[in-house]
Image: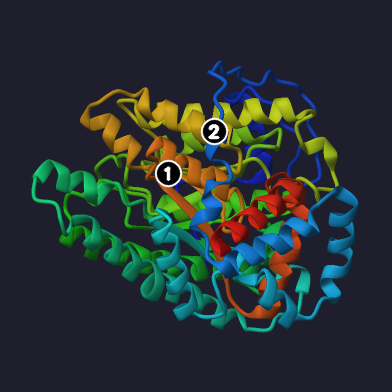
Amino acid sequence: MYRILPSRVGSKKLVGLVQRNAKIRLISSTNGQKNTTVYPIPHIKSENVKPDMDSESSYLDTLTKKELFGYFVIGLATLNKPILSLVIKLFPYTPLWMIKALVYQNYCGGDDVKQVVKTGERLAERGIKNMMVSYTVEACDGKQMSVSIPQIIEETKSSVTNILTPHIRSMLKDATSKVENPVELSNAINEIPPGYVALKPTGLIENAAEVLLNYENPEYYDRYNELVSNCESVCEIAAKKNSELKAEYPQREAPFVSVVVDAERNDLQQGVYKLQRDLMAKFNRSAIKGAKPQVGDACVVGTVQMYLKESFGILELEDKLAREGNYILGWKLVRGAYIHSEPDRGVIHNTKEDTDKNYDAGILKSIHNMNSGNPTVGHLVVASHNGNTQLKATQLLEGLGMNSTADHVRYNVVLGQLLGMADNITYDLITNHNVKNIIKYVPWGPPLETKDYLLRRLEENGDAVRADSGWPLVKGIMSTFFKRLC
């Protein structure tokens, strides 16, 4: 029997609701119809801030020799665009043992749970107290995988029970061990960001693309419900761990563990919106039955790619549905993971400036919503490799003032970056701006599957990798090695 949750909205209804409730350019829906009505992008005026570049290379001093060598290889591979393009072409033919020997540890958490736990400990040494772990296997378009769907689900559950829960317990114990003042104790408990487990919808059911494309088709109701059920099995474990940890640390105002639904390519995205909406409607509710949920009650976090013209309207629509359904939203806002591989360029903002304005508007809207008297957003992950963006978000949080409501909001806004990327920005935020609410996205899993992940990073984030790396990185690493020899 197909479940009709309070937030169920089909793609045709979604198009109409977004048009009525949001001032954006809505371009696409999965039924193939196009709407090219143009709405103005909200203008956000904010100070132009930049990271402290005086310490841009100082983070290299904090890295191990093996980590430095991995970045050295990446620097050589990204010296210029032609070299990067050649590396991308050769990458599928590069032996796995070579990748693991050279750069694997810089971008992947490991092959198994034990290795990922070690990665978390290493991040903590660098001031990054938590992570978003992703068992990186996909089943999209009938792709043959090295593991089965049941194993993917079990490993994802294991991410919660055997990686994230022990890790945050360790971080909390370490943070509170030397604190005696009750006020300082509360801050110590809340300054540790949540741990996150990422759900990749295309890795949680066979022929996932077909299911997501046809989620409204009655012939696919059972398959869609199977996908929802697979995701719910992970969410239920996260909810249970949150309840257990809350009993130990009642001062905690943010989730201990959250489940994040990752975005997919645009033609599948309406199905993903429906999936994350159904999960939030079930799990993002108040612990008090019937009460209105508040900031901090978001066990499930959905993803919106702000490079899409429809994105701001999606935020507006989901606000409306959450208010009607009495649940709270959790958001991970990204500029756009699939922007380079998106075949329909019409769904993307016309300029980078438009995308940046839209992204900033989404952050501002979410934080202001969380700080209001009647919030519908309960948690926010600002996922960006742009130091300017991360500092703007930090300034917005500082500008909320010093009161319990503002603190509650601050504890529920987290800055996120991919493991191995923007490490100079991460270092600057922690060292020069005392930022504590920062995490890294840590993929892990079978080596063959994580090799595919690394290729996607080169294809989809190549420009960002090149901006972080190239000749300046190579020179910086050579200088660091020289200093250690002297």
Mark 1 and mark 2 in contact (Cβ < 8 Å)? Answer: no
* Residue located farthest toward the front when viewing the structure as drawn: 486
Quick check: 75 above or below 437?
below
Marking on residue 430: 1
Q: Residue at x 23, y 51 (%)?
A: 189
* Residue 82 position in % (x across, y down): 91, 52
Question: Could you say where residue 129 lies in the image, as x and y percent from the top left?
Answer: 38, 56
- Give me the residue at 71% from left, 46% from top: 472
Q: Quadrant of residue 45?
A: top right
Tell me the number on the disc at residue 164: none
User: Left or right: where does residue 339 sit relative to residue 243?
Assistant: right
Specify few, some or many for label 1: CA neighbours under 10 Å numbering under 14, 14-19, or 20 or more. some
Q: Can residue 224 be seen in this snapshot?
A: yes
Could you say which disc has been placed on residue 51 in the image?
Answer: 2
Q: Residue at x 37, y 22 (%)?
A: 399
Which of the marked residues, 2 or 1, is nearer the chain's N terminus?
2
Residue 472 against residue 65 in the figure, above or below: above
Q: Is residue 402 left or right of residue 155?
A: left
Q: Residue 188 in the image: x percent, y percent?
A: 23, 49
Which three-letter amino acid code belongs to the residue tagged 2?
Answer: Pro
Percent coordinates x, y for residue 8 in the rendering: 53, 48
* Disc 1 element: helix
Identified at 22% across, 44% down, the residue is 187
